[in-house]
Amino acid sequence: MKTQVAIGIDVGGTNTVFGFVDREGNCIYESSIPTQADQNADQLFERLFTTINNDYKKFINSYELAGIGIGAPNANYYKGTVELPPNLNWGVVNVLDLVKKYSPLPSAITNDANAAAIGEMIFGAAKGMNDFIVITLGTGLGSGIVVNGELVYGADGFAGEIGHTIVDPDGRDCGCGRKGCLETYASASGIRRTVYELICNKNTPSSLREIEFNRLTSKDIADAALKGDKLALEAFDYTARILGLKLADAIAHFSPEAIILFGGLALAGDLIFLPTKKYMEEYLLNIFKNKVKLIPSALPGAHAAVLGASALIWNEIDKKHS
Amino acid sequence: MKTQVAIGIDVGGTNTVFGFVDREGNCIYESSIPTQADQNADQLFERLFTTINNDYKKFINSYELAGIGIGAPNANYYKGTVELPPNLNWGVVNVLDLVKKYSPLPSAITNDANAAAIGEMIFGAAKGMNDFIVITLGTGLGSGIVVNGELVYGADGFAGEIGHTIVDPDGRDCGCGRKGCLETYASASGIRRTVYELICNKNTPSSLREIEFNRLTSKDIADAALKGDKLALEAFDYTARILGLKLADAIAHFSPEAIILFGGLALAGDLIFLPTKKYMEEYLLNIFKNKVKLIPSALPGAHAAVLGASALIWNEIDKKHS
C-alpha cells in the first residue's frame, strides 16, 4: 500500500515553497519556485502545479497524495481567499477555486501564522494541547490561537492578530496605518527601531552605532548582546517588557497551556525568552502565574512552513474522519 | 407530559437567587435566600435545596426538573470548584460534589460572566452567533467569551478575564493586587474614580462635587450627564476611550460578531454605547472596522442571572444530545 502524503504550500513574497509531508510529519521532498509577486495568482498556481505534478512522478510508486494545505499572507480560511496581500499584486482572489483548476484533491488555506499553529499542534511543540498560542516574531508579529483544539478564526476568518493589539495609541507608526501596535515593538523590525531609539536617548557605547538602520538585523543585535553589548541587552529587555505585557493580556483572554515563539527574533533564544518570561509573569493576574509555558517552536526550521501548511490539510482530513 | 425546567442558581455575596426556567427561557418561578457569606458553602446549599425542594412542590404536577446550572464568583467549570471567592468565606470548595449530596440531577457551574454569555447565546442577544463576547460592567468588569460556539475556558478553566488586561502598568490600584487593570477604569467603580480624578484636575463646575466618594454611583453620574453636566460627560468619554481601546485589542484576538454590554454601567445606554463604539472603531485594525456590533444585553434584567445559570445546564444537555 502506498503511503499517503499531503502537499504543503507556503506562498512567500519572493519564493513559494512546496513539499510532500506524511502523516507523521516527515517531509519526503521539498522544493520551491519564484513567486513573481508582480504577476497575478493564477500564473503562480499554473507554474506551481506543473512543477508539483512533474516532481511527484519520482514518488508516484511509493506515495499517494491526500490533500493540499496552503499558507499565504492575508488568507481567509472560511472563504478560501487571499485578500489584498501587502507584498503580492493579487488583489482579492479565491485561491481554493484556482487550485481546483489544477487538482481535484481536497484543499484548505490559512495565513502563515495559523498554519504554524496547526503545524505545532500536529507535529510540534503543541502536540496534545487544546489551548495554546503561536507567535511568529519575524518582520512583523503574526499569531495563531487555538482554543478547545480549534483555531480561532472569529466571525470573519481574520481573528488572531495579536501583533495589532495596541501598546500605545500615540506610539510608533505601524504598517497598518495606526500607531503603537505590538509588532512595531516586538518583532525583528521592532527591536531594530528600539536600538535606534536607545542610540538617540542614551550615551551607552555600542557596536551597533556602526551599523546603518537599513542594514541592521535582529541577528546583529543578538550577536552584540551575546558579546555583552549593554545597549543591545537593553533593547532585548525593552522588547521583552512590552511583549511580556501584551502576552499577559492574551493569557487573561485565553488562559493557554503554552505560548510558542517562532521566527527570526525567537532564534535569539534566552536573550528573548528569559526576560519575556520574567515580565510576563510580573504582569500576570495571580491565578495565571507560573502556569503558562513560554517555549520555542519544535518544527524543524528548514521545513517549518511546509510542515505547517501540510498540517492544515491533515487536520481537515482528521476532522472529517472523527 | 410535564414541561422540563432547569434550576438556575446565582450565588451572590448577599443573596443567592434561584429559579425554574424552561427550554424557551421562560422563568416559571424565582426566589432567593440570604447567602450568609461568613458561613461555609455546605450550609448554603443545604438551606438552598431545602427551599428549592419545598418550592418545587407547587410545580411538581406540571414541570419536571432537567438539571441544575450554577453561576458563582471564581467558579471553575472544569473542576466544579469555587476557588477563594473574594466576598465569600468559602476557601476552595467543590460545589458540584456538594450539590450531589442534595440532588441527583445533572449539574454544571461557571462564573457569573460566563453564565451571562451562555444566557445571551441560548435566550438573548447572541442567539445564532458562534463568536461573541459578553462584558458585564458592574462593580468590576467580567467577561464571557464564545469562540466556535463554545465558551473559552482555557487550559485551567479561568480564561476570559478581559477586566484584568492592563491599560497602564503604573495606573490605578486594582483589587487583584496589580495596577492599571481595565476594570479600574471601565466599570461602575472605575467611572466613579474617573469622576474624582476629573474633580481634582479640572475646574469644570459639576453637581457631582456635592457627592462624597463612597456614596457616588454610576447612576448619579449618568443622571448628571443626562442633565448636561460637563464633568460627568467627560467621565463617560474617558471611560469609553479606555474601554474602546481594550475592546479593539479583544477584537484583534477574537474577531467576534458582536460585543454585548451588560450590567449597571451598561444601563447608561447611549452615554456609554455611543462613545465606546466611536473609540472602538477608531482603534480597530482596518479589516475589523464597521464589522463588530456593540449591543446591549437582551436578557430581561429581573431574571438575567437565573436565566444565565439555567442556560449553562440547558447547553450541557443539548451538547449530550447532539
Image: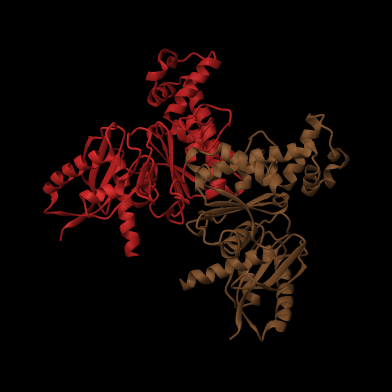
Chain colours: A brown, B red
Picture layout, residue B256 above or below residue B199: below
Q: Is residue A289 left or right of residue B314?
A: right
Observer able to see residue A139? no
Quadrant containing the N terminus of chain A is bottom right
Q: Quadrant of the C terminus of chain A?
A: bottom left
Q: Quadrant of residue B71?
A: top left
Residue A233 in view (yes/no): yes
Which residue is nearer to you in this view: B59 or B285? Answer: B59
The residue sitting at 78% across, 64% down in the picture is: A36
> Above or below — where is A268 with respect to B183?
below
Depth check, front residue: B234 or B165: B165
Spot occupied by residue B176 in the image (x, y as percentages of width and height): 47, 33
Q: Residue at x 48, y 21 (%)?
A: B195
Left or right of residue A145, residue B12 in this image: left
Q: Residue at x 34, y 41 (%)?
A: B72
x and y, in percent, of residue B239 in the image: 50, 30
In the displayed orientation, state which residue is furthest to the right. A210
Where residue A300 appears, as percent x and y from the top left, is: 68, 63
For residue A202, side relative to residue B295 (left or right)? right
